[in-house]
Amino acid sequence: MATRPIETRTLQELASNAAARYAAANPLSQASFERATEYLPGADTRTVNHYAPFPVTIVRGEGARLHDLDGHVYLDFLNDYTAGLYGHSDPTIQAAVVEAAGKGFTLGGPTPNQQEFAELICGRYPSVERVRFTNSGTEANLMAISLARAATGRDGVFVFDGGYHGGPLNFSEPDRRLNVPFPWVVGEYNDAESARSLIEGRAGELACVLVEPMLGGGGCIPGTRVFLSALRDATQRAGVLLIFDEVQTSRLAPGGLQEALDIHSDLTSFGKYLGGGASFGAFGGRADLMDMFDPRREDHLSHHGTHNNNALTMAAGLAGLRDVFTPDAVRRLTRRGDALRAALNGVAAGRDAPVQVTGRGSIMMVHFQRTPIRRRADLAATPQAARDLFHLEMLLAGFWVARRGFVTVSLAHDDDDCDALVEEFDAFLARHAAALA
C-alpha cells in the first residue's frame, strides 16, 4: 500500500508515526521501561514523567543537556518542570554540596547555612518576614493552608480550577480523588467578579485563598492584574488570608511575581529551584502569622520534619540564591525567556499557524489553538494529538520538552540554544501546517 503524503495525514496518524520512529530509536530505554514495570507501577515514581509509548531513561546531565540510555543528547528545555533552573552542573552549587557532604549529612540541629538561607529569602521576597523550610512545595502549601486555618479558626480553602499546588492539592486535572479532604471551594481563574463575590459571600467559612499568580501545570496562564488585585482587596476586607503559591513564579522577578505585580500576599509558598537541585520547600509571610510556630510561646503550633533543614539542600539552596541567581541574573533570565516566547509566537504568526505560546519570563507553554486562553477550560481547544506529535517530534530532534508543551529556560542556556529551539519549532510547523490547520 502506498504511503499517504505527509500533508494529507491526520494529526493522529502523524503522532502514531512519530511514536513508531521514537520506539525504534530507543530500544534500550524501552527494555529499561519494561523491566521497571515489574517493581514500579508504570515503571516510575512520578506520574508526570510518563508518556506513550514509553519515556526514555536519562543517565546523566551536564549544563543544559541530558543524555539517555540509547546515547541520544537533548537540549533540556523542560528543566524538571522549573526545578532545574541552574542546569545540571553548576560549579558553584556542586562545590557547596561537596563541602557540605564533607561536614556530615544529617546533623539534627540548627546550622549556619539554614540561618543565612532564611535571612536571604526574607530579604529577597518583600512579603516574607519569617520563613520555615519543608521538603517540597507540596508540603509548603499544606503547611501554609494549615497555618491559615489555625490562625483564622475557619476551615474553608478557596482555590481555582487549573491550579496545581502539589500531588494532593491538584486542581489541574478532572480526577481529584487523591486530594486532601479540606472543605474546598473551587472558582474560575481570572474571573475577578466571581471571585470577589464568592469571598464576600462566604467569608465566615473561608480561612484562605490559595492561588498561583500564573497557572503552571494548568497551562502557563498569567493571572491578570485585575483578577489578582480583586483577590487581595476582597480577602483584606473579609479577613481571609491570601496565599500566593510562588513555587514556580518566584523565579520571574527578584522578589517573585508578586513583586513584579506589586500585589503582596499574607503567606507565600516556595519550592523547586530554590533548593539548588535538591529537595526543597518553604513557606513564609507575615511575622504575626509565622510566629505562631515559635516554640517559646506556650500556645505555639508544632512544625516537624526530619529533613526540613537537611545539610545538602541548605548548602545548595544558599549558594544558588546568594551567588548564582542574583537579582541581575533573575532579570537576564526573564528577558531571555520573554524573547524566546516572543520568537516562538512570531514564527507561528509568520506561518499563520493555529499556535500560541503563553507564559511569562522563563516559563511558557505551547498551545495548538487560536482561541484565547484565560482559564484551564480554554485549553480544551488544543487536540491532544497535536501535543503528542509536537512532543515526540521535538524529542526526536534532540529537544527535551514536556508532553503538554511545557517549556522553561535555565541559566545554563545561551542565545544559540534558544535560537536552535526556534529553528526547530519553525521546521515542525512547516512540516505539519496542513494537519494542524
Image (tube, rainbow, N blue to C red):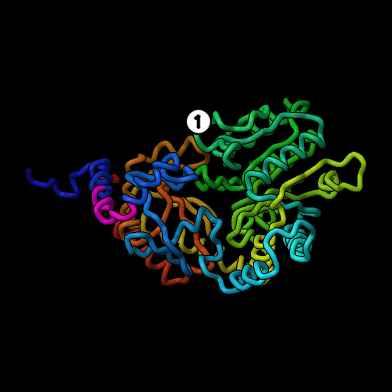
Say which quadrant the C terminus sits in. Answer: top left
Q: Quadrant of residue 229?
A: top right
**Image spot of residue 220 (x, y percent):** 52, 48
| Neighbour tally class for label 1: few under 14, some 14-19, many 20 plus, Cα within 10 Å | few
Foreground of the two, 68 or 323? 68
**Image spot of residue 202 (x, y percent):** 73, 26
Foreground of the two, 185 or 37? 37
Residue 237's place in the image compared with 212, above or below, is above
| Observer able to see residue 249 | no
Tell me what residue is drawn at x 41 percent, y 72 percent: 416
- Magenta region, main secondary structure: helix
The residue labelled by disc 1 is: 175
Q: Amino acid at mark 1?
A: Asp
Would residue 430 be found to the left or right of residue 204 on screen? left
Say which quadrant the N terminus sits in. Answer: top left
| Observer able to see residue 32 | yes
Tell me what residue is drawn at x 65 percent, y 60 percent: 313
Magenta segment range? 20-30
Residue 261's place in the image compared with 149, above or below, is below
Tell me what residue is drawn at x 72 percent, y 52 percent: 133
